[in-house]
Amino acid sequence: MNYVVTVFGSGTMGQGIAQVAAKHQCNVFLVDKNAEQIQKAKNYFETKKQKLESEERKQWEELVNRINFISGENSFVLLKEKIQQFSKTEGMIIEAIVENLSAKQELFQKAEVIFPSNYIFATNTSSLSIASIASTCKNPQRVIGIHFFNPAHIMPLVEIIPAITTSQETIQSAKTIIDSWNKTTVLAKDTPGFIVNRIARPFYGEALRILEEGIADVPTIDWAMKEIGKFKMGPFELMDLIGNDINFTVTKTVFESFFYDPRYKPSITQQRLMEAKLLGKKTGRGFYDYSSEAKPEPTKNHQLGEEIFFRILVMLINEAVEAVYLNIASIKDIDTAMTKGVNYPKGLLQWADEIGVEKILTKLTELQELYNEERYRPSVLLKKMVKEKKKFYE
Ligand SMILES: NC(=O)c1ccc[n+]([C@@H]2O[C@H](COP(=O)([O-])OP(=O)(O)OC[C@H]3O[C@@H](n4cnc5c(N)ncnc54)[C@H](O)[C@@H]3O)[C@@H](O)[C@H]2O)c1
């Protein structure tokens, strides 16, 4: 589809989003207030070209030719001129700038002055409410969350998040555009963490808790999740890859945004790692030490592994069930989001059906009785389903 897409922010996410849009024939403007950063983005596209052979190289060149790189103080003046040239084409802006509410609000307010009224205003925010970003716009009906996953040009999932003020027309158009980019879209309510960043919390949180209790060490917990659970990566490997600073901040933001619901409580162990700048792969050390080839060996005790895996899995399933109960997304979209957004081996609700909701409830009740903590409270929907002998997929 031939759209005009303006991407603000040419960092990690902006580059990937611009690439996806240009690949699908859109005319792209990639804008960054920082000239050095826009140069880095240009270099990324250039370096990639050098690595390609004939036909692929030609396609890549065509793709890059559809991207206009803009930076500097007069970006908006330049953009205004360029956008006018496409006055007959539909378009949207996607902001992937710094995760700061007033910066995003200010950007949209400035953009409202120069972009046509039929343009969609999308935000790629991970943790801010779409409602708050839309609230300072003259036309909040056209503001919507379009949440890509990193790396945006590879990960298939995109969460579409309408705010309370978003129009049906905006939702439909946003979905049509993103679907035309060969992405898998799911619809999520404007609530903290949307689908993936909310439901995935126990993957890290419960693993950290098991570690803190001394039930198993880091390599053993990772081994259990990979070997028995068939997850592609263990929780600690993944936290080290994401960065302990980023992972901790996401958890803390979700926890605070849910008014300190104990289910999302961050871990002091991870906070200390962050404070010590043991951020993971990017600093050479996190839960693992990447300076040496030798990896610590897990304790390959199958019974222990099963216990670890099942405890983390029931916590994940409980989150997914609660999200269904609170209408965060549909059953199908929740399962799609977790398999396509974070590569889970199976949809959590499908998993619940296979194991049996009764078994899940029994384990959660056992944990809640043992710890006497709200963290383990089973979802009301889970209890109802057990009572009514229901499945998610009938
Ligand atoms: N990194 C991820 O894994 C990820 C995943 C999904 C969503 N997000 C969200 O995407 C957004 C961008 O994240 P990122 O990791 O790409 O950040 P980043 O720091 O890599 O890039 C942000 C870029 O925005 C530029 N910028 C800042 N203010 C600007 C403005 N007013 N106008 C134009 N450019 C401006 C900065 O110069 C920088 O180049 C954030 O809202 C983040 O929460 C990030």
Image: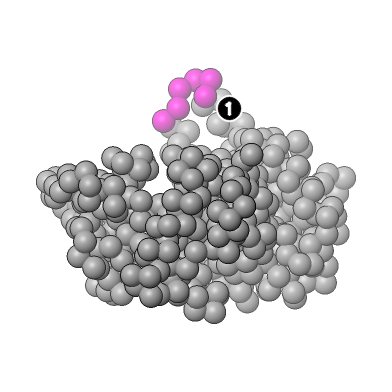
| In magenta segment, residue 54 | yes
- Give coordinates of residue 65: x percent, y percent: 62, 37
Residue 22's place in the image compared with 7, above or below, is above
Label 1 sits on residue: 59
Q: Quadrant of residue 143?
A: bottom right
| In magenta segment, residue 92 | no
Per the rendered image, the range of residues in magenta is 51-56
In this picture, residue 169 sits left or right of residue 122: right
Q: What residue is rendered at 58% in x and 64% in y?
A: 380
Name the one closer to the observer, 157 or 363.
363
In this picture, residue 232 sits left or right of residue 107: left
Pick the quarter of the image with the N terminus.
top right
Q: What residue is rendered at 69% in x and 39% in y?
A: 179
Give the image's coloring scheme.
one colour
Pick the quarter of the image with the C terminus.
top right
The amino acid pointed to by label 1 is Gln
Q: Is residue 268 visible in this depiction of the protein?
A: yes
Name the one closer to the observer, 164 or 89.
164
- Give coordinates of residue 44: x percent, y percent: 46, 44
Name the one closer to the observer, 62 or 14.
14
- Give coordinates of residue 180: x percent, y percent: 70, 37
Q: What residue is rendered at 58% in x and 67% in y?
A: 192
In this picture, residue 99 sits left or right of residue 172: left
- Give coordinates of residue 173: x percent, y percent: 79, 47
Q: Quadrant of residue 136?
A: bottom right
Residue 271's place in the image compared with 114, above or below, is below
Q: Secondary structure at mark 1?
A: helix
Q: What residue is rendered at 44% in x and 39% in y?
A: 345
In this picture, residue 187 sits left or right of residue 339: right
